[in-house]
Amino acid sequence: MRIDLLGPFEMIHESASTEGRASVVITATKLRQLLALLAVNADSTVSVERIIDELWPDGPPNTVKTIVQTYIHQLRKLFGRSFASPIGTDLLVTRPEGYVLAVPRNNVDVFRFQCLLDRSRDELRRGGARRATELLREALELWRGPIATDVTSGPALHGLSVYLEELRLEAVSLRIEADLADNRHREIIGELRSLIATHRLHEAFYVKLMDALQRSGRRGEALTVYRELRRILDDELGLKPSPEARQLQHEILVNQ
């Protein structure tokens, strides 16, 4: 079983024996939300209290624990129909304090993304820019849109979506950093301009664009980017550019 949450919710059954794959459809809103919560905590116990907080953030109904048990039973029936016995019935395990979705974390795209991002950081620290780029491209290819776009989100899933979006931007920034280290500065200028247009307050993209432009011999344009960064930060946040941005501007001025 594979669950993809970086975009529209998908649960996919991949059969090694038949070399086939099929999507398992869940239409009930609460069941999809419960399965998403279990999936982002795969192989770990999710307490009943946490399930209740996620599914009923405005206050649970009086019979909430019975309803949760009913949802768990419905998921087990779905797994039993969709996956070969005994695998299907063993996917959802009851623990004294809650429930565990017993699938490897690598079967959930959220964890694969985080693993690839961690590996890319290690490669960059070791100076392996090209390998880091490959890992980051693989990580970013997992994203088909915002996390669980078609799943209702309570506090836990909403918080996770915000966190993962920050990680996605970090992955983009690291991939650009790796491209710069691999002397691909000319190739990424257009992408950086697009990122700045979308993320106007994300200073790291301005700094990387300045770096790419000055490496390409376009120092005047790099200084224009710095002036735009300084204006936007002042107008919208009342802040000055970071020491890193100011240092890069100084280096560009000195080297003109």
Image (cartoon, grey):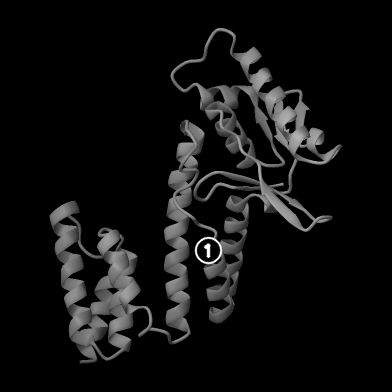
On the image, the x and y values in percent for residue 94 come to 76, 27
Q: How many tags in the picture?
A: 1
Give the quadrant of residue 101: top right
Residue most toward the right? Answer: 86
Left or right relative to 75: residue 216? left
Residue 244: in sight, yes or no?
A: no
Q: Is residue 229 left or right of residue 12?
A: left
Q: Position of residue 27 (x, y in %)?
A: 56, 32
Would you place residue 232 above or below residue 24 in this image?
Answer: below
Task: Give the position of the C terminus as an image quadrant.
Answer: bottom left
Q: Residue at x 20, y 81 (%)?
A: 221
Q: Nearer the viewer, residue 139 or 1?
A: 1
- In x, y percent, where is residue 163? 46, 47
Q: Observer-nearest residue: 237 or 114? A: 114
User: Could you tell me residue 104's position as x and y percent?
Assistant: 73, 48
Q: Quadrant of residue 216?
A: bottom left
Drawn side of residue 170 relative to residue 99, left or right = left
Please report the residue visible at 32 percent of the width from the left and 72 percent of the height from the top: 192
Asked if residue 170 is positioned above or below residue 85 in the image, the reply reads below
Image point 59% across, 35% down: which residue? 37
Task: Using the image as rendered, state which of residue 89 and residue 24 is in the foreground.
Answer: 24
- Residue 78, quarter of the rendered image: top right
Q: Which residue is mark 1?
A: 141
Element type at mark 1: helix
Furthest-top residue in view? Answer: 62
Please name the amino acid that badge 1 sits on: Glu
Name the residue located 31 percent from the left edge and 76 percent from the top edge: 190
| Badge 1 density bin: few <14, some 14–19, many ≥20, Cα 10 Å | few
- Residue 235 appears in the figure: yes
